[in-house]
Amino acid sequence: MLKTFSLGGVHPAENKFSAGQKIEILPVPEQVSVPIAQHIGAPSEPVVNKGDEVKVGQLIAKSTGFVSANIHSPVSGKVFKIDEVLDASGYKRKAIIIKTEGDEWDESIDRSEDLVTEITATPEEIVKKVGEAGIVGLGGATFPAHVKLSVPPGKKCEVLILNGVECEPYLTADHQLMMEKGDEMMVGTQILMKALKVDKAIIGIENNKPDAIKHMKDLASKYEGISIQPLKVQYPQGGEKQLIDACIQRQIPSGKLPIEVGAVVQNVGTTVAVYEAIQKNKPLFERVVTVTGKSVSKPSNFMTRVGTPLNQLIEAAGGLPEDTGKVIGGGPMMGKALSSTEVPITKGSSGVLIMPDKIAKRPKMEACIRCSKCVTVCPMGLSPYLLSTVSDKAIWDRAEEEKIMDCIECGSCSYTCPAGRPLLDYIRLGKGNVGRIMRSRTK
Amino acid sequence: MNVVLITIISLGVLGALAAIILYFVAQKFKVFEDPRIDQVEEALPAANCGGCGFPGCRAFAEAMVKADDISDLNCPVGGADTMSATAAILGKEVAAADPMVAVVRCNGTCENRPRITEYDGATSCTIASSLYGGDTGCSNGCLGLGECVDACDFNAMYMDEKTGLPVIIEDNCVSCGACVTACPKDIIELRKKGPKSRRIFVSCINTDKGGAAKKACSAACIGCKKCQKICPFDAIEVENNLAYIDYNKCKLCRKCVAECPTNAIHMVNFPPPKPKVEKPVEEKAE
């Protein structure tokens, strides 16, 4: 019996069309728009001006606090302007627009393919360097990685858990990365272990990727302390709390962070970025993006520079199919429909999903029949039907009592609702308001 | 017979005892309440809309009785009549507040502002605005899902199906501000009703640069500052590519209305311009 998390969950059709597609390097775009808010936390502050020459990997926006991240130029060329650009948030926000000229990398970046296994940096240096390189959680949550690596005083990290689950249907970016950059990932894991001062790391992989499990197991046998944990396919296993539950059977108390149970979770993609930052001095300015969908002629995994417009990826994957109904940034469960295909790729873009018109539309909303399916599938043990109603009726104290802030927004409730109710939409609304009320109370 | 008598007497004594106890308890725990609160509450419209900033008419009445200076307090629903009536009860002075009315500062009708995407989520402006800027190119404008109409307790609003925008029924609007709070885009504003209900306002809140605003909506304010230049009373200010008319300075001369290249400045309740008397064309003599 394979391990999985203990509460709720769903198993949507996997549809991993792009599985096994080699990571293709997307040509450098003619122009990039790099948003200054690509991570959770304070937006960065641009340090370049219009007309400045920049090189690949040069710092262009500085982090403005502990929970914030540096941003580096993904191309070489001239800063065309700093302007408001429509991004994946659906709003126009500040971005640095750079016109590409050639592809000149910063001299300090080691561009060779050689694997550097010897780790010379001290734990403090690693955390500092990860922060400088602007590394954020590449699974999609974009939480600055150095914050997670800084274990608060009084707490002790016992185990590092790496997320190779990729529980979102359709997406294959992490899967492919494990197949192609396994060695780098192993060294990256060792670096993270050193930074966290732990001697144990578990890489959780769902067993719909048997090739990745085998490949990683072979590699892990060469390194000390790293083990592979095959997991039963169940959404949302990639959620931090679910993954910890599945791997080490510890449950995080409501409102607390993983460090409470002695665990730190990082995505496998982040691990490769950490390897590149520490061993190759390469900051985070590119990532693997899956472009996929039922009607897409060439589902692919692309190594893409941050700031590349979405339509360039769609073109490279065979163009926008005629029957397109929705273009989603991210996976089908947690991703968000985009209002334009010109929005730039950011550090958090794990995939671009093109849904045919037939299946893209939401079902008509009907009355709740109290079937309690949403309660059964909720991985956090909440009552989504109730939370959505109290949010709609603005009964915020009740929403707080019912632990609305525990919701991880996985969307299992909306997915399973036979009445087609947009439960998560209302819960998000409630979370926003309750969060605001709670913050104003502590002030 | 005896039994009946005993029953009456014993019950009577019990009743009298209870009455005495209750009388003393009531004296002991008596809470003094200013009788004027009841009087003031009586004079208020009993709409309990919260437009005054207090939770209901009773709370407002209490605040009025308590306050020494009531010039800051105003019941927008009752207006000047109610306020002078309550002031008379309390023997206090009341400042004459200008009657206000809600205005919708968006003219992005289906015709002016073409839809470029389709919204497929929950019918709630707040949810839609948390997801993206809206189904048109303008990310400031009305989303058309009618949260303001739901918030109105006075039947003073409806959604115009043709334009996709909310319409305010002026006669019913009591300027309680419920729609202003409900709108996540801050489109609705309470403005001075104006003499004979005539007023002028900029019906747009788009802060994009001129070209982008115009591309998204043909009725958008493009921030050209023409109105600011022509205004003889310095009532118009253009900030962030958007003009705003200060209703306290505006003298309703309507020069800006004619000047605006996109017709973003609206005038309400002015009589239609007199038709020009055309000179009869003299027929040529044959």
Image (spheres, coloured by chain):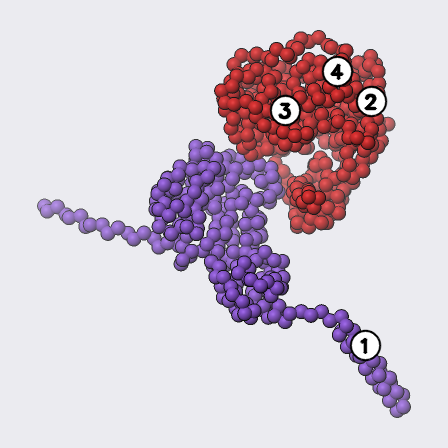
Chain colours: A red, B purple
The answer to the question of whether label 4 and label 3 lie on touching residues, with beta carbons closer than 8 A, is: no
User: Dot 2 corresponds to which residue?
Assistant: A198
User: Spatial distance from mark 3 to mark 2, Cα to Cα?
Assistant: 27 Å
On the same chain: label 2 and label 1? no
Where residue A403 sits, quadrant-wise, is top right
Q: Specify the farthest residue to the left.
A: B286
User: Dot 3 corresponds to which residue?
Assistant: A70
User: Dot 1 corresponds to which residue?
Assistant: B21
Q: Nearer the viewer, residue A426 or B203?
A: B203
Tell which tag, 4 or 1, sits nearer the viewer: 4
User: Spatial distance from mark 2 to mark 1, Cα to Cα?
Assistant: 75 Å
Q: Subunit of mark 3?
A: A
Q: Secondary structure at mark 4?
A: loop
Residue A284 position (above or below residue B135): above
Q: Secondary structure at mark 1?
A: helix
Image quadrant holding the N terminus of chain B, namely bottom right
